[in-house]
Amino acid sequence: MTTLRIGLLGAARISDLAVIPPAQDAGYRLVAVAARDPERARRWAEERQVERVVASYAELVTDPEVDVVYNPLPNSLHAPWNIAAIEAGKHLLTEKPFASNAIEAATVRDTAAARSQVVFEGFHYRYHPIFERLLEVSADRTIGRLTDMRVSMSMPAPGEDDLRWSWLLAGGALMDLGCYAIHVIRTFALQQAGVPELISARAVERSGRPQVDESAHLEFRLPGGAGAVADVTMDGPWEFTITAIGSTGSATVCNFVNVHHDDRLILRTSEGELVEHFGSRSTYHYQMDALASAITESSPFPTGPDDAVANMHMIDACYLASGLQPRQGDARQLAADGQRGRMGGYR
């Protein structure tokens, strides 16, 4: 396979960042899209130079011209359509979170284990050189011994009808933003050859939305003894920062999700402040490179099914520790319903 042939489940807004520009810049084909509203899908496809529209998600995942399925559907539809794509023999790029909960995630992982396709969770930040540099300076004593780290993620509130406020669609701040923050903290723990210990979790429900968290505060301990705090809110200003604090300095990535908007890593040590820049190439472009290498060259990558299950276990643990329930769902039943055409689409 000399080029990737990509099919898109739903006409989701995130596709305009995550897949369409990186694929077009790399010369890959955007073969097809399936969405609930065919007329809207046709307009959407024409504007983005997607080759054609197909009638259903089931038709998309079984399309013989599609090599890679991209799944940006609502959270509750990640696991069932991930399973459907894997069972159809397609490589998969799925938006985070991998599933509604750890049980679903394990079902997806087990489905993938019997097959040879690439199953890739879209934690795009992980593939950008700025994050690798943050890991480096946190481990090589540039800032001394790591003592604390903080991940802060904040965004203005979506509209009240937004799917991220839906319990049935597995919404909530921990699912939308917290999955990133937890993944960052887990990655730092993995660098120390361990897993983070959850110390405490607090969550605030969205008014009028029982069980759906608007914000959360999480505290962990890393294997090396450092503390790690994550603050996430879906009703605040824009902020996506990571700060690592050491015994002799600190390092801050100013926007680890959208490095193309702010490419600064700020190092503060006894020698003063140094600002490193990493350019305007997006995290999604680096992710597309890693996906293509995994598919065409069998290159290893860190955001596969085992990692996804571990992340979902931690998300579930944070919900339970905060007094809320993990998001619900039955991946096998949802997949069966979808194949029978009863599921419908959302975007």
Image: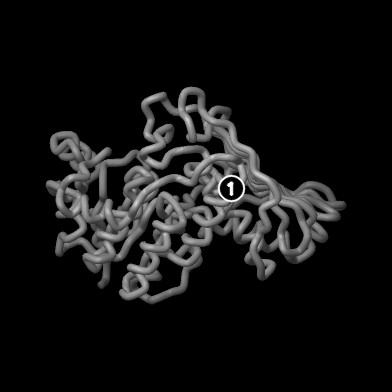
Residue 281 shows in the view? yes
Q: Is residue 59 left or right of residue 317?
A: left
Judge whether 312 appears above or below 136 on screen: above
Q: Is residue 246 left or right of residue 156?
A: right
Q: Which residue is drawn at 41% across and 25% down?
A: 159
Task: Report the residue marked by disc 1.
Answer: 318
Q: Residue at x 76, y 64 (%)?
A: 224
Q: Which residue is drawn at 50% across and 66% down?
A: 302
Q: Is residue 47 left or right of residue 54?
A: right
Judge whether 81 appears above or below 194 on screen: above
Give the quarter of the figure containing the N terminus: bottom left
Give the quarter of the figure containing the C terminus: top left
**Residue 77: x %, y % from top left:** 32, 48
**Residue 154: x %, y % from top left:** 57, 35
Query: 314 or 117: nearer the eye?
Result: 314
Label 1 is placed on what type of residue? Cys
Query: 109 or 244: nearer the eye?
Result: 109
Q: In this view, does 294 lie to the left or right of 172?
A: left
Judge whether 306 appears above or below 220 on screen: below
> Which quarter of the figure has residue 141?
bottom right
Tell me which colouring the rendered structure shows.
one colour
